[in-house]
Image (cartoon, rainbow, N blue to C red):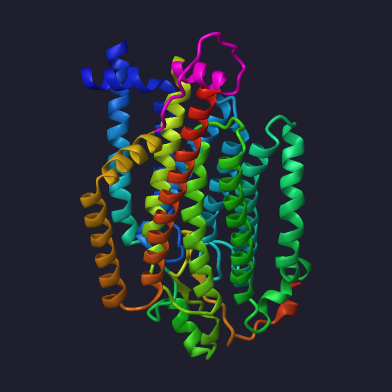
Amino acid sequence: MRFLTRIQAKVGNQLLILVHIWMAYILLSKLALNFSHWKIPFISLINYDLFFLIMLLSLAVFIKGENNRYVYLNLAIFAFGYLLGFLTIFFGEDYSIGNDYLQYLIWTYRKIMISIITCVTVIYIPIDYLYHEKKISVKYLVTLLITVPVSFIYFRNFLLSYRYLFIDNNFLKIFSSILGMNFLAIFFILLYGYLFIYRFKPISGHVNLVVFGFLIFLAIDSLDNFYNSINKPLPPLSQIILTVNLILFVLMLLDNFLYLGTEFGKFYEKYRFSKIKLTIRLIPRKTFVEKYVIFFQQYFKSLPYKIMLISLMAISLSFFLHLYPYGYSKLSFLILIFLTIAIIAYLNILIRKRTTLEVSKKNN
Amino acid sequence: MKKFRIKLVFVTLISYYLFTAIFPIIELESPHRSNDYDDERVRINVVTENVSKVIKIEYNCGMDPTPIPTFPPNVDIDTETLD
């Protein structure tokens, strides 16, 4: 019991309420599965539950936070869009509600909707960073001005006539269109990375982790959509990657939620956006990622370590490339490996740039 | 009072977990009516020689947990009935 009180004192009642709502959702969704529905793998059900938790946590962060809070509202809408898929599984002639046409139409138009929402969620982040002093309505307007025309170009046939879906193999064009939308979002993530190195504008600490999560999400989603667009069957591997990705999102949101609740968090967020003027000089808090990159940098300093680690990595990668059969899973693993290498290289450049700038500032 | 509240939280959490553990077991026996040929509806369809409307659902769902219903290129969907 003492353990529980300690937890309650640490996380507060608000988080316990959120956990209760989540548990209630899990219970209700499992009850709903007693109606006749499509057969879906168990891991998909876990992913739905995680999407609901992400929605709850990001709404809580949106209400509690001060800076870049609309990023979390978008994240909540994104999670809700994916969660609506849970209703789709009850549609169909042989199932609980509706008929087969309705099943196809709902599946397709939901897919188009979530593709647009994902794009808006991602594109809003660099726009928010670039025009951080502008009004929120202006930021949304710019985001929609970029997203809506592109999405109309990609999905125009489906939006102008729903019959288009049922003619020949037209449904495959949904996947290639979503692939195009994903590339647009990835382009804006790269733009954000570029801006973050060269422009010094304040941004809430956890937003970078949101961007990182979306990068993995979009990369794997693009690969899946590519294989789907050429009508190849896939193993449900991406669902496992999705679960890990969603757990990352949950941990990040949980950390943000607890950080915003503390006195230090409130003070530091105001200081970061210069809402408090201080006469003393504050040393910026090192983030979790920064600490680890510096730790690895120190390891890499000595030459034997460098040679050994790089040669081991090269050998294991070459074995993997040589022995593992070529196909979808190999490509997805390769994407993950190269993303990790790219992100480590990017962080290396970023930290070097920031530290040299600080040194030059001190000298001046 | 405080102790009672904490107990309440503890008991509800445990009961939620138990429920969520029990319901998937019940769910296994629930009627899944999908692409299985044992299904009653499908058997009726076989009799009426109208099997083509049976829809298979695939699991290659990408980063979306919702599976893809296999689009029926061989099924002639009468688009006029949609109206």
Instruction: Please give the count of numbered marks on the rendered protein.
Output: 0
Q: In this rendered view, identify the residue nearer to me: A341 or A228.
A: A341
Residue A37 horizontal side relative to residue A93, left or right: left
Q: In this rendered view, identify the residue nearer to me: A55 or A94.
A: A55
- Which corner quadrant holds the C terminus of chain A? top right
Residue A201, position as x, y percentages in the image:
62, 32
Task: Please tell me which residue is depicted at 59% across the width and 38% down the height of the picture.
Answer: A71
Residue A175, position as x, y percentages in the image:
59, 70
Q: Is residue A123 magenta?
A: no
- Farthest residue, direction top: A279
Residue A151, position as x, y percentages in the image:
71, 60
- Which corner quadrant holds the N terminus of chain A? top left
Q: Which segment did they paint magenta?
A: A264-287
Residue A7 horizontal side relative to residue A98, left or right: left
- Farthest residue, direction front: A363
On screen, residue A258 above or below B32 = above
Q: Is residue A278 magenta?
A: yes
Q: In this rendered view, identify the residue nearer to me: A171 or A98.
A: A171
Residue A146, position as x, y percentages in the image:
73, 52
Q: In this rendered view, identify the residue nearer to me: A191 or A218.
A: A191
Find residue A277 and report its image quarter: top right
Q: Main secondary structure of the magenta part?
A: loop
Evaluate whether residue B76 shows in this view. yes
On screen, residue A43 above or below B61 = above
Evaluate whether residue A46 shows in this view. no
Task: Please tell me which residue is depicted at 46% across the width and 24% down the height of the picture.
Answer: A284
Task: Please tell me which residue is depicted at 47% across the width and 88% down the height of the picture.
Answer: B46
On screen, residue B28 above or below A229 = above
Task: Please tell me which residue is depicted at 50% across the width and 74% down the height of the picture.
Answer: A227
